[in-house]
Amino acid sequence: MDKEIAIQVNHLNKSYKLYARNRDRVIDALSLSRKPHYTEYKALNDVSLTVHRGETVGIIGTNGSGKSTILKIITGVLTPTSGEVIVNGRISALLELGAGFNMEYDGIDNIYLNGTMIGFTDKEIEERLPKILEFADIGEYVHQPVKTYSSGMFMRLAFALAINIDPEILIVDEALSVGDVFFQAKCYRKFEEFKKAGKTVLFVSHDLSSISKYCDRVVCLNQGVKLGEGSAKEMIDIYKQVLVGQYDAEKAGSDTVQRKENEKALEYGNGKAKIVSSEIIDDKGLVNSAIMKGAECKIRMSVEFLEDVQAPIFAFTVKNKYGVEISGTNTMFEKAFLDSVKKGETKTVTFTQKVDLQGGEYLVSLGVTGYEREDFVVYHRLYDVMGLTVVSDKNSVGYYDMNSRITVE
């Protein structure tokens, strides 16, 4: 049986008229000329999306890709130019936190005001009030006008209100990073509670680790167009190509952006350099991808340069099986190589690492990048080109072992 649909977006378009001068806006509004005096900007271009009940779906993309626009249309803040949106369930939206607050009212009055706007009775708001106040944790300031709040207190109250109204659908736009680290941890715990309770979540964030950790499926947008949807790992790979100007929809899957080694590694770059070999070497000097926890290993790559390159940057990253980047470094961070390289040269780069990762399976990505006239460029990248197995007889909490020494007296 098909899953029940919580949100259905069909062929959504949102366009804006951009005017160079205010008088052009007046001419257009009064129909004083048959010639248009504006340029059309498409914030969304024929975007379709389905979110099933109980799913957590992420939306990623660069600034201006249409992420916030689609959320505002789904929540009714904006009206689409064309297309259809169907929502089945009560929504709580964490978009522009506190947008409905009256700055002259105190915190309590604003809770009742916003609760009423959502559709709650005074009794229902009163029942939820203790949880809201406990979550916000702003003390007696809740009885002061919100115009006297710090930005942190304002955001804490707005977040506490939005997340404690027991919605069926939660829509989040970059709102999980408000407040200090303790409040952020509280927000993420609440987010995890929503997932465990089978709530539907639509989640926009630039935090790719959070996208990888929480999302069942991810949609990638760019300049109002949907590039694709799939696993977090697949869509994050596309997003990273877009960030460095290497994504080409027509060439995706060809020699510019392709999969290597039976679809394991994603490869792209402008062709000025090429990673021709790579290997992991254990502490005995043997090529070996299985490394004992606590031992040293070497991550090595050889790079051939097909053009002159000024100050290339050599890099590696380690990701877990969910696509979360655990660690990594590069020659710029380490101040290890700042020279220029001539066409025809080959450089062998070796990163010597002590492996304190928890036992498990990891993926290693390699890259050669740099800057040309202050623009960041990718010469060659290989994502997930090597597997790394960390063998351990003792694991602790998290990704790394902090090698604690314990005494009990």
Image (spheres, grey):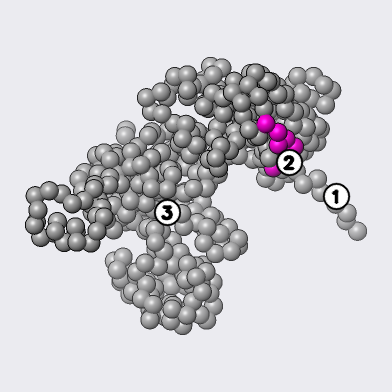
Q: Amino acid at mark 2?
A: Lys
**Mark positioned earlier in the residue sequence (1 or 3):** 3
Q: Which residues are magenta?
A: 333-340
Left or right, residue 197 beside residue 280: left
Q: Which mark is residue 335?
A: 2
C-alpha distance separating marks 1 and 3? 42 Å
The residue that mark 1 highlights is 405
Identify the element where label 2 is drawn. Answer: loop
Q: Amino acid at mark 3?
A: Asp
Is 204 one of the magenta-colored residues? no
C-alpha distance separating marks 3 and 2? 37 Å
- Regarding residue 298, the answer to whether it shows in the image is yes
The residue that mark 3 highlights is 173
Characterize the local packing of mark 1: few (<14), some (14-19) or many (20 or more) Cα atoms within 10 angstroms. few
Q: Position of residue 160 (x, y in %)?
A: 46, 66
162 relative to 287, above or below = below
Eye-nearest disc, 1 or 3: 3
Q: Position of residue 292 (x, y in %)?
A: 78, 30
Q: Amino acid at mark 1?
A: Arg
Q: Position of residue 8 (x, y in %)?
A: 28, 43
Question: Which of 168/405 is in front?
Answer: 405
Question: Which of 70/391 is in front?
Answer: 70
**Tags 1 and 3 in contact by the CB under 8 Å rule?**
no
